[in-house]
Image (cartoon, rainbow, N blue to C red):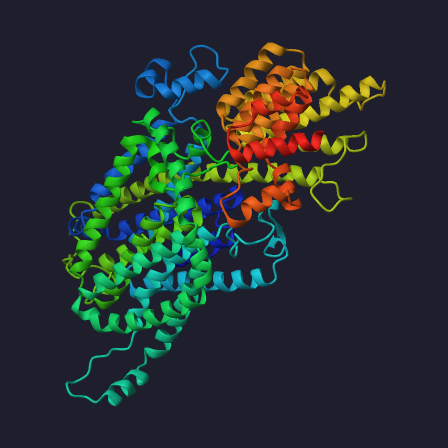
Amino acid sequence: MTIIDKIIEKGILFLLIFTPLAFGTVQQWSVSVMEITAFSIFFLYLIKKTLETSADKFGDITQFHQKLVLCPQIYQIILFALLVIFILLQMLPLPESLLRVISPAALATYRDFGNYPPGTYHPVSLNPLATRQALFLFLSYAAVFFVIVSHYRTKAQVASLVKTILFMGFFLVIFAVLQKATWNGRIYWIYPVDEILKSGVRIWGPYISYNNFAGYMAMAIPLGMGLLIHAAPDLKTLPNVPLRARIARFWASDKLESFTLYFLLLLIMTAALFMTFSRGGIISFVLSAIFFARITRRRRSLRKKTALLALLAAVILAAVVFASWAGLERRFADLELDHVSRLSVWQDSLGIARDYPAFGTGLGTFEDVYMRYQTTMPRIIFDHAHNDYVELLTDIGIVGFLLAAAMALFFSLPLFRRWKEKRGMFGKCLGAGGLSSCVAIAAHSFVDFNLHIPANALLFAVVCAITYAAIFNITANNKSGYSDTRSMEPAPSSGDGEGEKVSQKWRDLVICATIILLAIVMLSFPVRDLAADYRYRQVSRILDDKTTEGLDALPISESTMPAYLAAIESLNKAAALSPSNSLYQRALSDLYDRLGKWSAAMQSLNSPIPATAPGKKEAAEKALFHLGKAISLEPTNPDYHLALGKMYDRGGEPGPAEKELKKAAAAYPVNAPLRYSLAMHYLLTGRKGDALEQARTLAKIDDSYIMRESRQKDYTMERQTPGYLSWLSRSYLYSALEIAWRVSRDPKVIRGIAPDNPDASQAVELFLELRR
């Protein structure tokens, strides 16, 4: 094994270990590290193959050609290329005349929410940065898949990946249990989480959501089951052998140690999966286990092995289900309620598909678009559809969805057909486990978004590659390749041998230079994203008030002005590294806005300001400039329009202010916090009629005051218990009543804004009673 081979294999093992530990790789820094590693491994492998082809070009080309003949994945390669080209076209700026034809809804969105000059070119994607980031994630998974499929050709290589996944899953379980037992409100005991997650109920190990942790386990366990039955001691004996002799042979088997180890690992991981109480994870695992049992029972050579496994599985499930029955019963009792809520999200998402049918809204843009279509749950911001198939349809439309579906079919069907003809025991066992893992994630994707968690998506790519390598690359007679590949000697050279060698060296040099150039281009994107994210995160460290425990910003003063200027410089560098990221522009706008308010306050007090500090007018202009740029990059973001409207109001421009405030409301019609902010802004600026109208809308869309039917409901409401009063005061209906009371103390007006239902009537009467 060469040093390049070792780097490639260690790099893939690093990805399998790093990605789940880095909070599932959901933050920009960890995504960039994953992409840099994946692309580096991929291009290093291409250079390695180029140099090897130079030494044995004919044999390598022939083997590759026969590989495509034996497993005709050339169609999948073509479909993959078409899908990538399609996503690239989503990011291509197009003239309005063409965009009007292929995606009229996208053009209408740009016109309704953007402030673009006439003749501006627009892409199909409503957020090209999100599409580019999603595309690079997809390419990084594909790079790892390609390297494993092409490089891993022995049992030892494939087994090392499976064992790493199993031991990683086991470690995640042990870490999750220890962290829950010693929970202090922080992941890894040092990393703070949002207030809503402080209880730690939803957090499992490094994963923020137990559903994503369960998704990881639901893929890892079936793959481990394949390794388990391969390691199972051989139960074959001569006829009429006593049971005592059979048991003695079983205990004397040299496979018993590894079989016991794998069994214990899977037992612990299965128990953890059930203890998450993730209904999607549990159901998908059960379906994959049924699929595993069904396909292995059809293979005569696996029946005796799976019989033992079935017995053990029955014992495991009985013990695990019994131990967690109370929690499982509660979780599945809420299935109808959660089913209705998710069904409403899917129905709203299909509204996006109707408006953007052919080309979608752009890969990775669901969160940007869904806000305008959301009709329920006004307090929740949905960044995913909780159904990977629905989200894929909304993102890339019917055209892209059909390409992706065809690519999946052209991969899975030949793989399954080949597995049914497989002879080697290792390939049969690992193939069955890998196929079952794919069934698990395919089922789980109907009710969750595991494939949008990079650690889980990468694991899925690795599982697919392992399954392919076990079935196609490893056979009983040839552990390192195809058993039916004809051995061929390199063709004899003709002509001037020395001249041909020189020509081949130049060709290799050109190919290697091209690969290196392509690697530099591809790696530049995640490297720049990583550097920009570092600059952006540095701002919180620069402005952190060290005298307080939390991340409180330093108060603005002459002594802290250098820190604010350093923060602006760091943000400018982040924006220069990633000019299409609206987040950095918004952060710059916020800093200039704060500095402008401070300068205005200092001027009103006739106090001097530092010469390096921006004046009131300069700060206001820069705040408007950067916020306008953020809107041009992400036109459907309601927070940006709300902030711009408030700035225009402070600057004495009511016309543009009202325009932006209406855009904010149209960008997220049913969001309760946004409606509350609009109502309070109108109230504080003296527009009481607009404030009352927003309060009326807020009261209609909020449903947090409605109590679920229970035995305690009537008692709680009638007795007006302290808990009920506290809970009611936190609802947006109560906030809407407060705003209406400040506008008009007329009880008729107060009652007029409330919805027509018993819970709302009870809340209104209680509110008025407390005001008398």
Q: Is residue 103 visible?
A: yes
Residue 689, relative to residue 30: is it above or below? above
Closer to the camera in the image, 329 or 659 = 329
The mark tally for this picture is 0
Q: Position of residue 705 (x, y in %)?
A: 56, 37
Q: Is residue 58 visible?
A: no
Residue at horizontal 74 percent and vertical 40 percent from the top: 545
- Snapshot quadrant of residue 283: bottom left
Residue 663, relative to residue 384: is it above or below? above
Closer to the camera in the image, 183 or 66 = 183
Q: Is residue 203 left or right of residue 301?
A: right
Closer to the camera in the image, 101 or 446 = 446
Closer to the camera in the image, 301 or 571 = 301
Residue at horizontal 59 percent and vertical 52 percent from the top: 199
Q: Is residue 499 left or right of residue 670?
A: left
Q: Quadrant of the C terminus?
A: top right
Q: Position of residue 238 (x, y in %)?
A: 16, 85
Q: Is residue 49 left or right of residue 637?
A: left
Q: Position of residue 514 (x, y in %)?
A: 36, 38
Residue at horizontal 37 percent and vertical 69 percent from the top: 318
Residue 369, relative to residue 114: is it above or below? below
Q: Position of residue 519 (x, y in %)?
A: 41, 40
Q: Quadrant of the N terminus?
A: bottom left
